[in-house]
């Protein structure tokens, strides 16, 4: 019995060591404390409040227990008893913005969450979820895990076909689709993601069950079965325009809209007709221009772009799985077709904006070489190149997605709202790129100064292959 006891104790010790080395989260993401009072003084305030001035100089912002308590002229709060013991931050004219929202990401492991905070992203929407994402989201909100607010769909719903992937739940019939939706609802998911191969029967089953259960639907617009001749010789079985009134929370990717809505024909006049129908239907689009733009950047550089600073934040399991895609795009010639696509996607996004289609900023971060956190700045740059002003691009990453997602407590800086904030040293209204490296971030009541952000940047590069495999086991085992 004593030998057995020692054996079990030894196994427990080995298991604990294995957990500590391979699976435990970096300590910098746990044990964070909420500041009871923070005074951020002398800021250039970009509140994003509709109707407010784009910039309000020399303002002070008081935060109590993670909630904005007051916004005043600089110095007006001196003597206020609420300042006793407060953390005082002299911004010295730096710009204070609402925390950024990335509306389309793929999170595989906890260190990636640090990358988002490092670059001012305080809310993300994960569009390929597992139950582990629900647990992480709960821990973040309770303060047990430091990270951006994590919204998530369930696992992607698709049908067999050319775009089916190993992390998709494949359904063909309406009954199968309804059962898959119920299963995700029982697991605790409130949001669904659909994909392009969905058969019409399965798609209608998803919509019916989602409406019955009060779940939202986002994703690629389903095309139906890809029969011979589609799309070059004949239209998709599910026409793009027929989906516009189906109640999507968001439609993802300008390039997917061009593929489905225009049958991949880069025709500006036809795009304008499509855009007018989208505007009339009131759809919301996440353009994710960076997703294709990064493919072109890799091709232009013969793969060198894959080795730029920051790629260490890409998940190591995903990098291994996607090695063939990296090799393919490193060898592509972007000079003709792909460059034309890049320009057309920007033009099409500008057409949507001009027509009044609601745009929200998302990046597809976490796949290919779309870096967690940093990619949102690249997307904002591309939105500006598409014709949005810097202020309009920032709206697409703050107040607009907050409204789309029903997050009434954020997206703006106003009394009573959650103090998800970023402080940047330059003026993002003249140079949108300045949001990439904040000097400070506040998320879920935690104030992160420059030293904290540097530590988080280091954490973001500590992805674990064994831990990522453990996270992905439901995918690998088909238990979704």
Image (cartoon, helix red, strand yellow):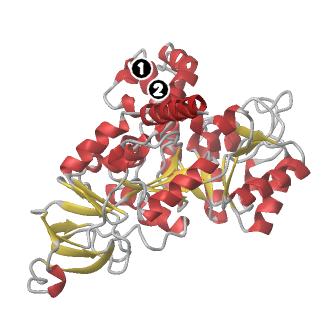
Q: Which residue is pictured at 49% across the width and 40% down the height? A: 109
- The answer to whether 422 appears left or right of 370 in the picture is left
Viewer can see residue 377: no
Q: Position of residue 353 (x, y in %)?
A: 49, 56
Give the quarter of the figure containing the C terminus.
top right
Give the quarter of the figure containing the N terminus.
top right
Task: Please identify the quarter of the rendering in which residue 373 is found.
Answer: top left
Task: Please identify the quarter of the rendering in which residue 418 is found.
Answer: bottom left
Viewer can see residue 195: yes
Along the line of sight, which residue is nearer the eye, 119 or 259?
A: 119
Q: Position of residue 428 (x, y in %)?
A: 25, 54
Q: Position of residue 463 (x, y in %)?
A: 43, 33
Give the SS element for disc 2. helix
Give the SS element for disc 1. helix
Is 378 situated above or below 241?
above
Is 260 situated above or below 204?
above
> Residues under labels 1 and 2: Cα distance?
6 Å
Q: Which residue is pictured at 35% across the width and 64% down the height? A: 420
Residue bearing mark 2: 296
Along the line of sight, which residue is nearer the eye, 135 or 271?
A: 135
Tag of residue 116: none
Q: Which residue is pictured at 14% across the width and 86% down the height? A: 80
Along the line of sight, which residue is nearer the eye, 111 or 437?
A: 111
- The answer to whether 12 appears left or right of 389 in the picture is right
Q: Which residue is pictured at 75% across the width and 41% down the height? A: 169
Mark 1–mark 2 CB contact (< 8 Å) = yes
Q: Badge 2, how many Cα within 10 Å: few under 14, some, many 20+?
A: many
Q: Position of residue 50 (x, y in %)?
A: 38, 74
Residue bearing mark 1: 300
């Amino acid at each position: 019995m004593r030998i057995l006891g020692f054996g079990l104790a030894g196994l427990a010790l080995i298991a604990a060591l294995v957990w500590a080395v391979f699976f435990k989260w970096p300590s910098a993401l746990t044990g964070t404390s909420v500041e009871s009072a923070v005074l951020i003084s002398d800021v250039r305030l970009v509140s994003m409040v509709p109707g407010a001035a784009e910039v309000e100089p020399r303002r002070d912002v008081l935060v109590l227990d993670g909630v904005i308590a007051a916004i005043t002229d600089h110095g007006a709060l001196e003597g206020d008893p609420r300042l006793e013991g407060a953390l005082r931050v002299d911004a010295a004219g730096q710009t204070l913005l609402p925390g950024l929202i990335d509306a389309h990401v793929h999170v595989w492991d906890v260190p990636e969450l640090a990358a988002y905070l490092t670059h001012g992203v305080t809310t993300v929407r994960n569009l390929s979820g597992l139950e582990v994402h629900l647990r992480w989201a709960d821990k973040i909100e309770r303060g047990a895990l430091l990270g951006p607010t994590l919204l998530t769909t369930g696992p992607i719903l698709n049908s067999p076909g050319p775009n089916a992937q190993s992390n998709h739940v494949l359904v063909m019939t309406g009954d199968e689709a309804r059962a898959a939706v119920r299963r995700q609802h029982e697991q605790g998911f409130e949001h669904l993601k659909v994909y392009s191969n969905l058969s019409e029967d399965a798609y209608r089953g998803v919509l019916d069950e989602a409406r019955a259960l009060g779940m939202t639907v986002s994703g690629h617009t389903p095309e139906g079965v890809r029969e011979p001749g589609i799309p070059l010789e004949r239209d998709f079985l599910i026409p793009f325009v027929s989906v516009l009134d189906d109640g999507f929370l968001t439609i993802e990717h300008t390039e997917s809209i061009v593929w489905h809505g225009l049958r991949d024909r880069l025709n500006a006049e036809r795009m304008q007709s499509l855009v007018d129908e989208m505007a009339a239907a009131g759809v919301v689009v996440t353009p994710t221009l960076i997703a294709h733009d990064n493919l072109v950047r890799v091709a232009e550089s013969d793969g060198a772009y894959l080795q730029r600073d920051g790629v260490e934040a890409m998940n190591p399991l995903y990098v291994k799985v996607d090695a063939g895609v990296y090799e393919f795009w490193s060898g592509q010639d972007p000079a003709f077709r792909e460059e034309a696509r890049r320009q057309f996607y920007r033009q099409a996004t500008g057409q949507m904006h001009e027509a009044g289609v609601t745009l929200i900023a998302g990046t597809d971060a976490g796949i290919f070489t779309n870096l967690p956190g940093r990619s949102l700045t690249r997307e904002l740059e591309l939105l500006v190149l598409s014709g949005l002003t810097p202020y309009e691009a920032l709206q697409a990453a703050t107040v607009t997605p907050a409204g789309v997602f029903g997050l009434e407590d954020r997206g703006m800086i106003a009394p009573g709202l959650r103090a998800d904030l970023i402080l940047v040293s330059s003026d993002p209204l003249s140079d949108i790129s300045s949001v990439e490296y904040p000097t400070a971030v506040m998320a879920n009541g935690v104030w992160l100064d420059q030293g904290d952000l540097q530590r988080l940047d280091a954490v973001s590069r500590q992805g674990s292959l064994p831990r990522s495999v453990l996270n992905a086991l439901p995918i690998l085992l088909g238990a979704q």
